[in-house]
Image: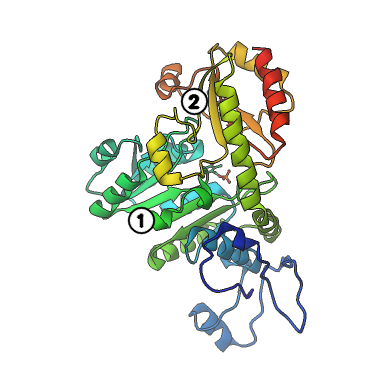
Amino acid sequence: MGAMEDGRNEKPGTVVRRAGLREGVSRPVVTPIQPSVVYASPTIGTLHAQYEGRAQGYTYAREGHPNAELLARKIDALEGGEGGLILGSGMAAVTAAIMGPLSAGDHILGGNQLYGRSLRLMHQDLPRFGIATSVADPTDVAAMRAALRPETKMILVEVVSNPTIRVADMEGIAALAREAGVLLAVDNTFTTPIGYRPFDHGADIVIHSVTKLLAGHSDVTLGYVAARDPEVGRAIYDFAVTVGFTPAPQECWLAERGLYTFPLRFKQAQDNAAALADWLAAHPKVAQVLYPGRADHPDRARAQALLGDATGNMVSFALKDPTEAAADRMVQAAPELPFAPTLGDVGTTLSHPASSSHRGLTAQGRADLGITDGFFRVSVGIEPIDLLFADFEAGLAAV
Ligand SMILES: *Cc1c(COP(=O)(O)O)cnc(C)c1O
């Protein structure tokens, strides 16, 4: 196994320290890719020792391999977690976090604005396996409390909601979970460990879509999940290994490479997001801007308390003209801003929730969330800010 430095890295930038395998008197600076699916043990006794945890060593790649392990240890260091797992996608991480520890008859309470596929898992899939689900507004801890049931085993929330950028009452929810004795799982994809470290604030499980900001280049699909309690971690691991949520070594390697620049990318994207939010707010075609770093954000005090200065790279805004035709003119007039349903890429991407992530809702359901047909979510990238101003000016001029 790679000789990672011991101890928790408190500063995100310290994950940049290269730490890989050490063999002989010199070592490669760059982590080798190890595609082997199988690992040979020298004796039967050694294999027993490996399975019983008395000896370290890999056996079969579905159960773990060096590239996944090294990446997991680096994200553990960022999150202040231990024993995290890399899985084949963010959704694999969400699914394993729920289906590992929970059983038929249990209930899970989710935030009402979770990632679209997480909501689908809650509404369509878990009930088929006898796991009851419901959702409530995570900015309103009284509503969360009212939705708890005697059989509730887990609360699943995201810190910042998609696409309306509302900030959950994480302190209230953590206290509620503690008081009710239920597991608190936090999908930290939007906030990242630079913005918020759920384990420092009472979370039991931390989940990431590594696909997004951590890997950062829209060229790998991976997930991460870690649990505070080793027994819960074991249940998640066993489920993930059984159903085969295995990540590919090559993808883990790419994500590790992306992670080395994550703190730099995050800072640049965030500086751009703050500048773009202010620029949009001053634009005559724009009705509303949602960014946690702005004084007019509806959850500004909570955002400051939870995130400090790390208000992230996600900005949403609504056009004064709330029609799809206006939104479409903007998309077509700004071809340099890819109209693409993802986030966390090095480049800025634009999403239109009414036609993508939230198309399954009724117009009234979207209106209740504040999502008009003129509502956009922007994942701000690391381009020079003047380029972004020019692209958005071109788009908005066509509205
Ligand atoms: C993208 C995303 C996921 C799913 O991740 P994949 O890697 O696409 O499977 C889960 N949660 C959040 C908040 C996301 O943004």
The residue under the point 65% across, 17% down is 396
* Residue type, mark 1 in image: Gly
**Residue 194: x and y, percent?**
53, 51
- Residue 15 appears left or right of 161: right
Q: In which quarter of the image is the C terminus?
A: top right
- Residue 287 appears left or right of 67: left
Q: Mark 2 and mark 1: span between their CA atoms? A: 33 Å
* Residue type, mark 2 in image: Gly
* Callout 2–callout 1 Cβ contact below 8 Å: no
Q: Name the foreground residue: 380 vs 30.
A: 380
What element does badge 1 sit on? Answer: loop
What element does badge 2 sit on? Answer: loop
**Residue 77: x and y, percent?**
53, 63
**Residue 239: x and y, percent?**
47, 59
Residue 247, located in which quarter of the rendered image?
Answer: bottom right
Q: How is the image coloured?
A: rainbow
Q: Counting other residues with Cα less than 10 Å from the Cα at mark 2, is it few (<14), some (14-19), or many (20 or more)?
A: few
Q: In the rendered image, which residue does mark 2 sit on?
A: 360
Q: In the rendered image, which residue does mark 1 sit on?
A: 202
Q: Counting other residues with Cα less than 10 Å from the Cα at mark 1, is it few (<14), some (14-19), or many (20 or more)?
A: some
- Residue 50 appears left or right of 219: left
**Residue 6: x and y, percent?**
55, 74
Q: Name the foreground residue: 96 vs 291.
A: 291
Q: Name the foreground residue: 182 vs 23.
A: 23
